Image (spheres, rainbow, N blue to C red):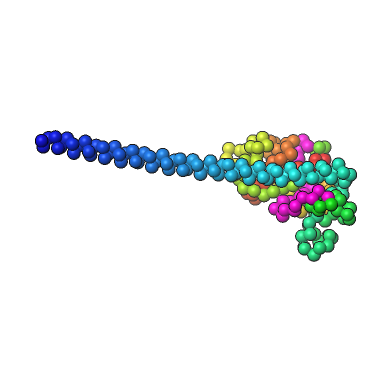
Amino acid sequence: MIQKQKLQSGNALWFVLIAIALMGGLTVMLSRSSGTSEETGEYEQNQISAAEVMRIGEGLKIAVENLRARGCSENTISFWHDSDGNGTEDGSDDYYNADAPTDHSCHVFEPEGAGLTYESSWIFTGESLVLGLGSDTRTELVAIFETDIDVCMQLNDLVSVSNDASDAPAEDFDMTVFTGSFGTTYTNAYTIGNTSSQFEEKFQTCSKSGGGNYYYAHVLSER
């Protein structure tokens, strides 16, 4: 009888040990699953953010193309925004273009023109040349948006630009808020594709600047 009780006690202890082991394994699996879900969620969120940035960039490009099709010349297109809020369009405002029609028919952000909504997070510049686009002697009309490393690398994946091992390619863009006419002759401040050859002939790229920031660039009009 005593031997039988010892056997039963031993079996019970064995089952307890098995249960503890199984619970430990389940905890590890759940922990890994939670980590994987978080990583998957972040990846999907980066995809969504990248797609939204690209959507806005493409919308800007289409707006410029539509204005050109309606008769607006390169030097009459305006990205004017009433940045000082005084209700007057003049040289104190961002992107003021004295050559644009006063009826706003060539304005990107006015209902009489393309009717887009102005977003201050975007910069419009005419001082960067993209190798392989246009003549390679004149700068392009470019919209630039600052982002982070994860979204930047996702943007490059979506437009078939090769990222480095764990970072976006290095390149600098001109960040000057442009005012005046886009139809004049420019001395390009930056040549996109000189540092990172994978940017050549690309309408959309995302790079790491020398200052460590990340910028998405969308060419609105190549020259």
The segment highlighted magenta reads 113-133
Image coordinates of residue 153 in percent, x first then y, are 62, 41
* 32 and 196: which is toward the camera: 32
Q: Residue at x 65, y 37 (%)?
A: 158
The answer to whether any part of residue 62 appears in the image is yes
Image coordinates of residue 213 in percent, x first then y, are 64, 49
Image coordinates of residue 209 in percent, x first then y, are 66, 47
Q: Residue at x 77, y 35 (%)?
A: 132
Q: Residue furthest bottom?
A: 86
Query: Where, quadrant-wise, is the N terminus in this rendering?
Result: top left
Q: Residue at x 45, y 40 (%)?
A: 33
Q: Residue at x 59, y 44 (%)?
A: 45
Question: On the image, which quarter does residue 11 sit in?
Answer: top left
Inspect the magenta stretch and tell me whether residue 49 lies in it. Answer: no
Inspect the magenta stretch and tell me whether residue 124 lies in it. Answer: yes
Task: Answer with left or right where residue 12 lies relative to residue 151.
Answer: left
Image coordinates of residue 44 in percent, x first then y, are 58, 42
* 1 and 17: which is toward the camera: 1
Q: How many numbered circles does the render carry?
A: 0
Task: Answer with left or right where residue 56 lies relative to residue 148.
Answer: right
* 79 and 55: which is toward the camera: 55
The answer to whether any part of residue 142 appears in the image is no
Query: Where, quadrant-wise, is the C terminus in this rendering?
Result: top right
Task: Answer with left or right where residue 196 lies relative to residue 9.
Answer: right
Question: On the image, which quarter does residue 81 sit in?
Answer: bottom right
